Image: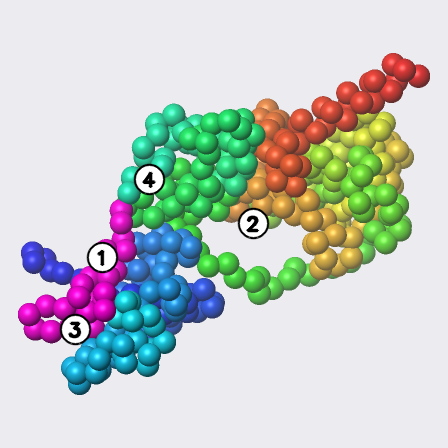
Amino acid sequence: MAGFRRRWLLRDVRAGFWDGVRAGLSVERAAVAVGVSRASGRRLFDEAGGVLSNAPKSGSGRYLSLAEREEIMILWAQRVPKAEIARRLGRDRSTIGRELDRNSTGQGYRASSAQRAAEERATRPKPAKLAADPVLRDRVQADLRARWSPEQITARLVRDFPDQPRMHVSHETIYQAIYVQGRGALRRELAQCLRTGRAIRRPRRMPDGRRTRQGKIAGMVPISERPAEAADRAIPGHWEGDLIMGKDNRSAIGTLVERSTRFCLLLHLPGGKDAATVAEEMIKTIQRLPAELRRSLAWDQGTEMAQHAQITLATDLDIYFCDPHAPWQRGSNENTNGLLRQYFPKGTDLATHTPEDLARVAAELNGRPRKTLDWDTPAERLNKLLSSYEHVATIA
């Protein structure tokens, strides 16, 4: 509608809204809590791209608040001296004097007008770093397309360009360049390359349910009996495994993650997830590994591992089973499965992917730098291990 203008919201109102969102309230409830409409709350959230760090916080103490400005307005109208106003508010006399000189008009001092003017002055827009540097922007966009996270990109830029600060950028700047209106230095569609694939950030929430397991597997050895050396990740060759499921649980891909390097292997299971199919593919994959990388495997208590004894016999790999409802016992595998959902979204038919597709995805995932590896990639860590084994064998 021509001439339509949105209601201007005071900073204290916007800050209170974001404080509510940070505390876990929904966007609608946070809006109602500060006395604005649900539509206004949704607009605030969308304009910030859901980036909480880009949103105002209440009560910093450094700047005058709206409440303080209202107190100044009342006292100044009562002809209270500036020094006394400063004393009552616990502020420096020069702060009060500067505030009155800067924001008084022919109609006197008005708190709401002063607050709005102060916020407009505080904006100080400046060109976004990624918008101003095409070389840095192209590098960041290329890494995003390779499914690197903003944190991985940030750390790798520091490593690759240690003496070029212009090529350094924070991960928060990358997020804001994608999500926040007015700071869109990166192409909006690159949000699909992020792990979540969302076009807007969402507050993190805790899961509200757990999966249940039925039945037991004969001859299971509990994870509590796994060698202690597997726990500290110092010795390679200890793996974690699981399945990621496709639409209606009718298709699956097996995942194996080595604990010390986070190196990932994918099992092609076009014939389904029955125990015989999983055992056949796992034996084929594990037998390609050197003996030094075949120490143990931790798996969930799924019936797909009913033939675990045959796998151990064929590969000399000891298999241990995690406790029910304890995904943290396979933390590396759980994290990797989350990353793999970028390539194999939930609700899709995983049987359509060929072995070549899985190999390409595994290579890309193993080529991402990891914070837990001091920004090495899993492939780099594995190559170092294999090189050390070859060196030892040569010396022997």
Q: Secondary structure at mark 4?
A: loop
Looking at the image, how many numbered discs can be counted on the residues? 4
**Dot 1 or dot 4, earlier in sequence:** 1
**Residue 275, image quadrant:** top right
- The residue type indicated by label 3 comes to Arg
Which numbered disc, 3 or 2, marks the residue closer to the eye?
Answer: 3
Q: Which residue is mark 1?
A: 120
| Marks 3/2: CA–CA distance | 62 Å
Residue at numbered disc 2: 248
Secondary structure of the residue carrying tag 1 is helix
For the residues labelled 3 and 1, the Cα–Cα distance comes to: 16 Å
Q: How is the image coloured?
A: rainbow
Callout 1, which amino acid?
Glu
Q: Which residues are magenta?
A: 97-125
Q: Which mark is residue 110?
A: 3
Question: Which circle, 2 or 1, is nearer the viewer?
Answer: 1
Image quadrant in which the N terminus is located: bottom left
Q: Is the residue under label 4 in contact with that under label 1 (CB below 8 Å)?
A: no
73 left or right of 338? Answer: left
